[in-house]
Amino acid sequence: MDRSLKLRTVILVLSTLLFIAILLPSFVPRSSLPNLPWPANKLWNSKMSLGLDLQGGLHLVYSIDLDKAIDDKASEIKRDLESQFPDAKIKGAVKTPATPLGAVTVLLDNASDVAKVRGMIDKDYPKDITWLDCPKGETPNPLCFRVSSSFGDSLKKAALTNAVSTIRERINEKGVAEPNVVEKGDDIIVELPGLDDEAIQETKDIIARTAKLEMKVVDDCSTYNPVGCTAANSAHDGSPYMKKLFAKVGSDRKGNPSDPKAIALEIKAEVDQWRPDEGGGTHTDYYLLAPDRDEMAPVEWAKKHGCLNKESVVENGKTKCNITGRQIIERYLYGDPALGYVGLVQEDPTFKVPDDRQVGFELLDPQPGAKDTRKFWRTYYLERTVKLTGSGISNAMGSYDPNTNRPIVLLDFNRYGGRIFGDVTSQIVGMKFATILDDKVKSAPIINGAIRGGRASITMGGGNPTVQERERDELVAVLKTGSLPAPLREESASKVGPSLGMDAIAKTRLSFALGILLVVIIMVGIYRWSGMIAVFAVVFHIVVTLAVMALFGATLTLPGIAAIVLSIGMEVDGNILIYERIREELLQGKSVRGAIDLGFSRAFSAILDGQLTTAAAGWVLLNYGSGPIKGFAVMLLVGVFTTVTTNIWVTRILFDWVVTRKKGQLQTLSI
């Protein structure tokens, strides 16, 4: 036996054992596998998963919350106009009223500027806005418009496409095998195979996280100013609205409320005071505080708010729900018709929040050792105007605060973001500047001076370090993959059972068994012992294909099984091409060795051409297909590689073995 054949045989045996070892964790429980020394134990980390159609999983349907995206566009137009006014020597204010949706109101000091500003707006936003008649009482010299419906339609289409891409990247960052994310009409369909309940919840959280990072000023100015609250334009002993709300709720020396409704809802009125490091008067921030708590709620209300599940106990048409402190405060302020609760705004319209202000909420985890271990929510009185968004951020990374050792996210601003951040912080020295992520205030630090270094940080809230680190890492991941263009609404979530998969698996086993049996009968019947070589090649082909899938953590789906069956056919077809070429050479009087050499060399081009054509088709499907089509394409390309390998390399080794063992005795082949 020549040295080359020995080496090829050793490689074939070792690679076969390696592929079998890679496949073992997919068919044998990890606990049953032996403990191997490093690095051999890494073999047990590779595992092939079954797809949603074979083992069940999670089926989610999301839709785009277009209202938020349109509101953001109005804020963007407001910021743009405010930045242009100083250069154009125009004096005035820009507001974004809560109604109608996407509305912008420009109030100009000089009537002569009205035509000029209207021309600027028409030039910059020719297709994005629709002009409106201003409501009575808007002075001085108002211009009113809103984001147009045509822009909303185009935004929706772009938002759907971008959201699909962003969701897919986030799931891949999470490490979920073979997610299926597709756009269907106005919805986004997400399918996640084989996850446990905890992994399902974590994945849903990271999908739905808009990663809409916004920065807004906390208004503590004593006098209301439509232009906005700054350090220079007012005293800072608390906003008039929050002062009035604080007095309504009431607070005695022990911090207990006096309003009966606030007492019933466990709402407290608190005050935060500080003196800036740079000097100046004392700042006062009034706020409300409420804990999460359990309540008996009507079934319909519970269903709408997502607290009704299979384990819920219904008594007299009600079930227990965990109500967040945020929901409690919002009920107190705005009411809840479904519960028959009349809010403060309905009782006294003067408690309506001004159109250019809003109430923000921050989640506070209980401190270690606290008697009340419930989570609390506190309010912030914010300007509605967004001063800076995530578009001004160039990079995000996780770190730790050197003073407190709390997990933080370090933000690097791009040139635009750094300039805006520096300008805003210079105007609000001594005030709070809130960082808002997905409609929740993450932090509201006091600005002690203008920050122009192009960097900032977000400190993670809560008292559990493990939760803080996980939230920090998830925030970094979503900021890096990009913000969703608009918030997502979860329309439905359902677990797909494996019953369909069990039927499919049973039928697949039957088809595999029948297919291999037919291959054995046909190949052995026609080519005798040479046919046994083809049978071994088919088995080797299947093992290698599945091992490659397991090695890369791929998911086996029904389309993938179809691709494997197709590749088996291609592998057998390649063997037949080789065998027929060898037969022709033997009929022309060639020796066995010569016929084998010529048969393999002359069949190689035909096999390669066929596989390259198949690979080209698979590449097109991989790049332009999605979901099941993509799964089929992946397995088809893997099958092309294994087919060429088994046809040209494995089969040749076995033929060389036979010829070498019967050297001088073999006159012909059973072919």
Image (spheres, rainbow, N blue to C red):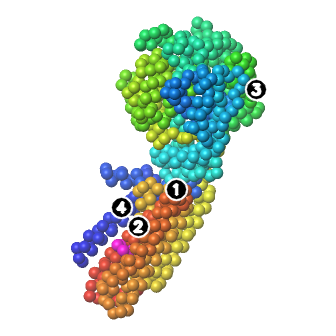
SS for dot 1: strand
Is 260 situated above or below 87? above
Specify the segment rendered in magenta.
647-651
Three-letter code for the amino acid on which mark 1 is drawn: Leu
Q: Residues within 10 Å of mark 3 (few under 14, many from 20)?
A: few
Q: Position of residue 73 (x, y in %)?
A: 58, 36
Three-letter code for the amino acid on which mark 2 is drawn: Phe
**Of label 3 and label 2, which has the lower sequence position?**
3
Q: Give the CA distance from mark 4 to mark 1.
A: 22 Å
Q: Position of residue 566 (x, y in %)?
A: 51, 70
Is 231 situated above or below 643? above
**Of label 4 and label 1, which has the lower sequence position?**
4
Q: Give the CA distance from mark 3 to mark 4.
A: 68 Å
**Of label 1 and label 3, which has the lower sequence position?**
1
Along the line of sight, the residue nearer the viewer: 293 or 240: 240
Q: What residue is rendered at 37% in x and 85% in y? A: 582
Q: Residues within 10 Å of mark 4 (few under 14, many from 20)?
A: some
- Residue at the disc numbered 4: 18
Q: Position of residue 11 (x, y in %)?
A: 30, 67
**Of label 2 and label 1, which has the lower sequence position?**
1
SS for dot 3: loop
Q: Quadrant of residue 504?
A: bottom right
Q: Give the CA distance from mark 3 to mark 2.
A: 67 Å
Three-letter code for the amino acid on which mark 4 is drawn: Leu
Q: Are marks 4 and 2 in contact (CB under 8 Å)?
A: no
- Residue at the disc numbered 2: 641
Q: Quadrant of residue 69?
A: top right
**Which marked residue is nearer to the observer: mark 2 or mark 1?**
2
Q: Give the CA distance from mark 4 to mark 2.
A: 17 Å
Q: Position of residue 592 (x, y in %)?
A: 32, 87
